[in-house]
Image: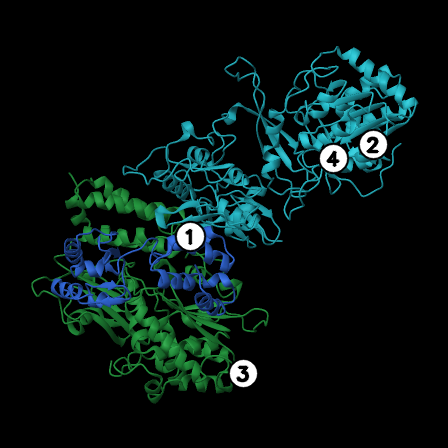
């Protein structure tokens, strides 16, 4: 399940902190980077490696919203729906995405290509409305821009 | 030493004391959930908000260290409004389970709702729902909806056992307690979370639906599961008020919970000790005198026979006795006096060692009174030596006094004695293998049916109390000795209670000097490390 | 404002060469050579610098809480709070993405003042681009000897670690940030103890906002008086990054002197209302937590004290502009939803109360509430405020209190008779 290369990356991370437990968030990021999400067995491995209980790890995974507890789409769309984006039309944008992709928030398209979630303020209020697609921000969105972007994704 | 004024009364406290501790030390209730003296301070329930003059906001008493000159109000309108608001917040999503919840009658939510709440609900929206009746461990049941997220249980698993099985999952109002799938709450101290849970979220599976707490009679006693001697409270059914469906009065033990004793067990006890009473329920009892097992015998006749066999064998130097290490000191003392009066009786002690001492409470020595036996019985042998002698045909009459709850503990004795000893006398509460093999059985009271003192591994003498009537004709150990002494013309003092025996014990055996039942009280006395010497 | 200070490099390449060419890392070098940590604290104290993360606490005062004499058995830590999650706020992101070396230098310089052994930059998980940019800058700075052992020959050893969060607004609260950094759920901690006495791993710790720290190299180089002289008065001083969003033509980050007039930001720099036929209705001047202002309250300078006098706050300087098309009930529901979602759940009033307020507001918006529910809503907010472990409870209460106070009519209209 865990190869030597991965273990080495984890060792480097753990070495940065005065106590191994502090490496929890960055190590969980490594797991998610490798697997796309964080499954139960991975939580147990992380717990063992950092000297904490598995329940502790699960508690962190369920607290921090960016960790995925199940596989999501190849393109994970996180649309901001807090106040400034609401003022600039994010609700209309969300509705458009639902219709275009045929899914509701929290769901994955049947072909596994897209998933959609609503998130809170992404710190891009000046370029609202916007969403984060995987790691990247896409700002100053219009319905047309969204269509062009999503239609052009491989 | 800082001085503070609480509700108009000035008191002096040790530096580092919190306002809550100061108030509680004065018997002044400040309501609280998450604070527990055996755990770290969390400060999350917000129930203990009090007013400190000059502070802009109310502060939580549990986390506010006393400063010299502080003026605290715990009962004014501002504080009452805060307490009412916290109660309201706690109740809006709380399920109305009281009618089926084990905690009813000892539930802080109930008590504080009456004392500090508004008495009516303003909440009209749907409650947040979670899983109910989650088997979170072999001994503990979790109802997530009832949980008030005080974090006592998570802190216990983190700080006391260091095992971390319980954690909070999710966030906000969806926060809930849980265990990692496949790693349930099964450490040796798991049931303590039930004691500390202020509501009915964590309950003991063995006690689930067994009894309402107002039908329990509570007696402070000492656990006899190992040499630690955790202080406990034993709850039995209230005989007069409760009958089972079969029409029998029910005063069985319903549950055992720890009592606080900082010198012995802190606030905790282990699961095995807590549930050890169930083995007593399961074992068959020796209800009357029998000779052999199954054929009842008149008590007078039985004790006469036993006394006769012992006397004859003692005079010939062919008598022996094996004691369990779980008996109260008064039993050892009385029998020791009897044997001394009879002549030569070889005395063996059967120790019970299982597992290892852990770094918390559990002792490998499962003898609750090993040290008492050591101090009182004087020159003793290991039970093995006696059994070997019996195997060589050197013993005519062997008396086994066992409070042995575990069949394996006595199998060794039984296998060593069959057919080699002419008279095997069993004195004890349980119909175990030895009892079945014995030629004569004398019923003794079990642990919860008698008073007496136990000495723990650190030399602390503690008093157990009678929680309910003995089953059948079970008698305290010392009384059986006294009855035999009468038949054997051995003179023993005229005792009429176990406390009387303790008196004689205190006069004769050095470590017990000066001890009385009332002096032992609820917390026991540490005997000075003097060498035992019998009078 | 004539000269841009904090944003002087944002249109340049974010490389070490360019940064140094513009005078970057001079402040760090000079300070290590000629000033003690205590002296740096004094300078910052005199400058009047106040926290730009939301609370506005005087930075020099906060710094002075750290132990003056360093105990060799007790490492010190300086945490750069780059968790920027207050809705309406996006200024720190600008600095991190476009002038990462300013963030690095200011962190190290402040770390020196705190006698830190390790500096951490705690960056919100969503800022991936900023995190990558910062990692590159940290690598460059380490190679150049600005980070690590015996920095610039000073004898001071200090590492700089970038630590990514994973989606929790509450981790911007300084004690929750510490919990998260230690590998726990982002639970705020009760105070006392205070971070300077017992912070991360029980050691003396200082936490400051990214923009706050970014001011430090300039204060050290140009002097406390220079900084104090910018803005309305010495209690509201220095250059300030304002984040403008909502119904305006030119939303974005604007650097001006502290105390810039709100109306000029909206109508001048911001290009005026998004739609010319929809006038200003309301404005939140300091991020979603602060009390809302009606249009008629918006003649005010954007500084700590001026806004406090108007019954609001500068907070994180996230100015959110709402025009006449805005339904205030919906805006408040969206706001309360945010707090219910982000509440960590640790303490009773916030955990239970935010959800309750959300549900009452939903009923109000759907026309399923009565005017009694407005009183109930306010009462709930009043009982969350001041009774929680951290300020998120207050932050959830203030919008409810201010919206009901200043826009009560609109809420009443939604209620059944």
Classify the position of the C terminus of chain B by image quarter. Answer: top right
Tag 3 subunit: C
What whole-number distance in Å separates the C-alpha atoms at marks 4 and 2? 20 Å
Residue B476 x %, y %? 73, 22
Mark 1, secondary structure of its residue: helix
* Residue receiving disc 4: B369
Query: Would you call the spot at circle 2 few (<14 residues within 10 Å), some (14-19), or many (20 or more)?
Result: many
Disc number at residue C155? 3
Return the disc, 4 or 2, that comes first in the chain's sequence: 4
The shade of chain B is cyan
Task: Specify the farthest residue to the bottom.
Answer: C21
Label 1: chain letter: A
Tell me where residue C120 appears, x and y as whole percent.
43, 70
Q: Report helix, strand or loop for mark 3.
A: loop
Marking on residue A58: 1
- Image quarter of residue A122: bottom left
Foreground pick, C188 / A90: A90
Q: Could you tell me which residue is drawn at 40 percent across and 49 percent down?
A: B169
Q: Nearer the viewer, mark 4 or mark 2?
A: 2
Q: Mark 3 to mark 2: distance in Å?
A: 76 Å
Q: Tell me if residue C190 can be seen.
A: no
Kindly identify which chain the residue marked by label 4 belongs to.
B
Among the chains pictured, the one given blue colouring is A
Q: Secondary structure at mark 2?
A: helix
Q: CA distance from mark 2 to mark 1?
A: 57 Å
Residues indicated by labels 3 and 2 sit on the same polypeptide chain: no
Residue underneath mark 2: B386
Q: Left or right of C87: which side holds C188? A: right
| Dots 3, 4 in contact, CB < 8 A | no
Q: CA distance from mark 1 to mark 4?
A: 44 Å
Near-viewer residue (C342 or A143): A143
């Amino acid at each position: 399940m865990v190869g030597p290369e991965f273990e080495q990356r984890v060792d480097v991370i753990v070495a940065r902190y005065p106590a191994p437990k502090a490496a929890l968030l960055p190590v969980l990021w490594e797991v998610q980077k490798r697997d796309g999400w964080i499954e139960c067995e991975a939580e147990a491995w992380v717990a063992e490696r950092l000297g904490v209980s598995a329940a502790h790890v699960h508690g962190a995974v369920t607290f921090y919203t960016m960790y995925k507890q199940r596989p999501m789409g190849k393109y994970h769309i996180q649309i901001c729906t807090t106040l400034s984006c609401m003022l600039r039309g994010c609700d209309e944008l969300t509705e458009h995405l639902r219709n275009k992709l045929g899914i509701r928030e929290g769901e994955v398209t049947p072909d596994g290509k897209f998933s959609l979630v609503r998130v809170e303020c992404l710190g891009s209020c000046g370029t609202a409305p916007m969403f984060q697609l995987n790691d990247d921000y896409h700002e100053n969105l219009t319905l047309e821009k969204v269509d062009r972007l999503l239609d052009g994704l491989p | 030493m800082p001085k503070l004024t609480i509700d108009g009364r000035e008191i002096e406290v040790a530096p580092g004391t919190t306002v809550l501790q100061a108030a509680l030390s004065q018997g002044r209730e400040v309501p609280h959930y998450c604070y527990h003296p055996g755990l770290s301070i969390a400060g999350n329930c917000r129930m203990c908000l009090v007013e400190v003059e000059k502070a802009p906001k109310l502060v939580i008493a549990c986390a506010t260290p006393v400063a010299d000159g502080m003026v605290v109000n715990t009962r004014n309108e501002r504080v009452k409004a805060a307490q009412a608001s916290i109660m309201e917040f706690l109740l809006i999503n709380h399920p109305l389970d009281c009618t089926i919840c084990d905690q009813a009658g000892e539930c802080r939510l109930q008590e504080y709702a009456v004392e500090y709440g508004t008495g009516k609900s303003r909440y009209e929206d749907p409650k947040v729902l979670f899983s109910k009746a989650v088997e979170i461990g072999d001994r503990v049941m979790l109802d997530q909806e009832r949980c008030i997220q005080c974090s006592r249980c998570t802190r216990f698993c983190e700080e006391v056992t260091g095992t971390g099985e319980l954690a909070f999952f999710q966030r906000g109002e969806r926060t809930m307690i849980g265990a990692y799938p496949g790693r349930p709450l099964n450490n040796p101290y798991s049931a303590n979370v039930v004691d500390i849970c202020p509501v009915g979220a964590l309950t003991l599976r063995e006690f689930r639906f067994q009894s309402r707490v107002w039908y329990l009679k509570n007696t402070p006693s000492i656990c006899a599961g190992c040499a630690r001697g955790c202080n406990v409270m034993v709850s039995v059914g209230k005989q007069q008020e409760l009958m089972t469906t079969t029409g029998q009065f029910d005063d069985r033990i319903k549950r055992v919970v720890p009592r606080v004793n900082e010198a012995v067990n802190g606030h905790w006890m282990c699961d095995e000790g807590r549930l050890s009473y169930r083995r007593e329920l399961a074992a068959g009892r020796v209800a009357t005198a029998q000779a052999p097992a199954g054929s009842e015998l008149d008590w007078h006749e039985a004790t006469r026979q036993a006394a006769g066999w012992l006397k004859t064998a003692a005079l010939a130097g062919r008598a022996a006795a094996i004691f369990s290490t779980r008996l109260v000191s008064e039993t050892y003392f009385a029998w020791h006096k009897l044997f001394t009066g009879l002549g030569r009786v070889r005395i063996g002690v059967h120790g019970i060692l299982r597992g290892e001492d852990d770094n918390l409470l559990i002792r490998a020595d499962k003898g609750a009174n090993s040290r008492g036996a050591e101090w009182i019985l004087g020159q003793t042998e290991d039970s093995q030596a006696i059994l070997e002698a019996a195997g060589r045909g050197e013993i005519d009459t062997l008396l086994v006094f066992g409070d042995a709850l575990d069949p394996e503990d006595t199998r060794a004795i039984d296998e060593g004695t069959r057919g080699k000893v002419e008279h095997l006398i069993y004195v004890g509460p349980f119909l175990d293998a030895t009892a079945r093999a014995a030629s004569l059985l004398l019923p003794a009271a079990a642990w919860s049916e008698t008073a007496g003192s136990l000495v723990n591994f650190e030399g602390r003498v503690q008093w157990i109390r009678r929680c309910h009537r003995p089953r059948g004709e079970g008698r305290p150990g010392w009384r059986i000795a006294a009855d035999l002494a009468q038949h054997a013309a051995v003179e023993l003092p005229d005792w009429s209670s176990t406390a009387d025996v303790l008196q004689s014990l205190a006069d004769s055996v050095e470590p017990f000097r000066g001890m009385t039942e009332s002096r032992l009280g609820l917390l026991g006395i540490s005997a000075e490390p003097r060498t035992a010497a019998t009078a | 404002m004539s000269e841009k200070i904090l944003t002087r490099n944002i249109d340049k390449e974010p490389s070490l060469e360019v940064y140094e060419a513009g005078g970057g890392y001079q402040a760090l070098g000079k300070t290590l050579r000629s000033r003690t940590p205590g002296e740096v604290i004094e300078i910052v104290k005199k400058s009047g610098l106040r926290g730009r993360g939301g609370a506005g606490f005087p930075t020099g005062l906060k710094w002075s809480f750290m132990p003056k004499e360093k105990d060799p058995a007790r490492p010190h830590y300086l945490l750069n709070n780059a968790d920027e999650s207050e809705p309406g706020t996006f200024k720190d992101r600008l600095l991190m993405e476009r002038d990462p070396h300013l963030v690095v230098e200011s962190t190290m310089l402040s770390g020196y003042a705190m006698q830190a052994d390790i500096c951490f930059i705690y960056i919100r998980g969503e800022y991936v681009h900023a995190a990558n940019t910062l990692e590159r800058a940290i690598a460059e700075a380490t190679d150049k000897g600005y980070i690590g052992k015996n920095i610039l020959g000073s004898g001071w050893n200090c590492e700089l670690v970038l630590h990514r969060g994973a989606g929790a607004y509450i981790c911007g609260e300084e004690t929750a940030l510490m919990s998260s950094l230690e590998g726990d759920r982002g639970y705020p901690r009760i105070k006392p103890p205070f971070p300077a006495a017992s912070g991360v791993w029980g050691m003396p710790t200082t936490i400051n906002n990214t923009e706050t720290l970014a001011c430090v190299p300039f204060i050290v180089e140009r002097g406390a008086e220079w900084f104090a002289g910018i803005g309305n008065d010495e209690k509201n001083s220095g250059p300030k990054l304002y984040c403008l969003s909502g119904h305006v033509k030119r939303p974005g980050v604007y650097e001006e002197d502290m105390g810039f007039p709100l109306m000029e930001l909206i109508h001048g720099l911001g290009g005026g209302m998004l739609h010319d036929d929809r006038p200003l209705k309301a404005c939140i001047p300091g991020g979603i937590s602060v009390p809302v202002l009606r249009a008629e309250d918006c003649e005010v300078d954007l500084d700590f004290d001026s806004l406090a006098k108007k019954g609001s706050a500068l907070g994180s300087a996230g100015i959110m502009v709402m025009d006449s098309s805005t339904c205030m009930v919906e805006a408040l529901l969206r706001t309360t939803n945010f707090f219910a979602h982000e509440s960590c759940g640790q303490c009773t009033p916030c955990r239970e109360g935010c959800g309750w307020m959300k549900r009452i507001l939903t009923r109000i918006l759907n026309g399923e509430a009565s005017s009694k529910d407005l009183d109930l809503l306010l009462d709930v907010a009043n009982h969350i405020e001041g009774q929680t472990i951290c300020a998120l409870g207050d932050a959830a209460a203030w919008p409810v209190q201010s919206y009901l106070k200043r826009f009560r009519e609109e809420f009443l209209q939604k209620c059944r008779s």
